[in-house]
Amino acid sequence: MRICVYCGSSDGNDPTILDMASDFGRQLAQKGIGLVYGGSSLGVMGTLADAVMENGGNVTGVIPENLFSKEVAHTGITELIIVADMHERKYRMADLADAFVALPGGFGTIEELFEVITWNQIGIHSKPVTVLNWNDFYTPLLDMIHHAASAGFIKKANIDILQTSETVDECIRKSTKPVRLEE
């Protein structure tokens, strides 16, 4: 089992996010769940990967050539796959993963999250997609999704693609169970 985790390449302003990312990585390793992520050594991404590695887990990073050359690539992980561009990176990460999780992050994290939700919606995959709403980080985004649904742009079954969790334990538990969506 491998979980693809989307998260920030910055530390953010809330130090508990890095603590949570470290706990997430530790728990993945302890449960024998591999990490697939964007391959960076920086921010939440680097903290998460370091925690998996420090606890004897397996980490696969996928990074585009242009980011590797800027020396942000994490060279201390199990496997680092260098790809041509962001499109190939996202495809490769999705292909390697059995589930997807979004931890706190910025535009890239949110874009990747919405892409895998959309891929699920149109039948490209049927893998679990879970947001870890740490300290209500994603509450405004979740409110926007529900607003779009009440405006008639998102069907109930498609809202249910995105699972939410408040804790690391709950997030990992939801991510490792198959999702059954109503037709």
Image: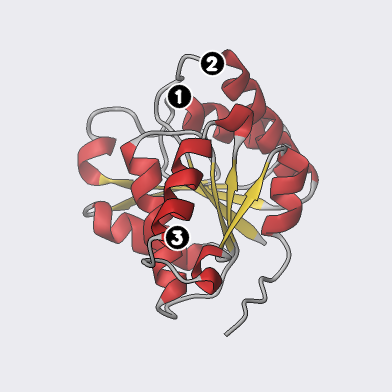
Query: Count the marks: how many?
Result: 3
Q: Measure the C-alpha gap from mark 2 to mark 1.
A: 12 Å
Q: Measure the C-alpha gap from mark 2 to mark 3.
A: 32 Å
Q: Which residue is mark 2?
A: 14
Furthest residue toward bottom? 183
Question: Dot 1, crowdedness within 10 Å: few (<14), some or many (≥20)?
Answer: some
Mark 2 or mark 1: which comes first in sequence? 2
Q: Which residue is mark 1?
A: 43
> In the rendered image of this protein, does residue 163 appear above or below residue 15?
below
Figure quadrant of the N terminus: bottom right
Q: Which residue is mark 3?
A: 150
Along the line of sight, which residue is nearer the eye, 56 or 43? 43
Q: Position of residue 151 (x, y in %)?
A: 38, 61
Q: Quadrant of residue 121?
A: bottom left
Q: Position of residue 157 (x, y in %)?
A: 55, 73
Closer to the eye: label 2 or 3:
3
Question: Dot 2, crowdedness within 10 Å: few (<14), some or many (≥20)?
Answer: few
Mark 2 belongs to which amino acid?
A: Asp
Question: In the structure shown, which secondary structural element does the residue marked by tag 1 occupy?
Answer: helix
Mark 2 or mark 3: which comes first in sequence? 2
Mark 3 belongs to which amino acid?
A: Ser
Mark 1 belongs to which amino acid?
A: Gly
Closer to the eye: label 1 or 3:
3
> In the rendered image of this protein, does residue 99 appear above or below residue 54?
below
Q: Quadrant of residue 70?
A: top left
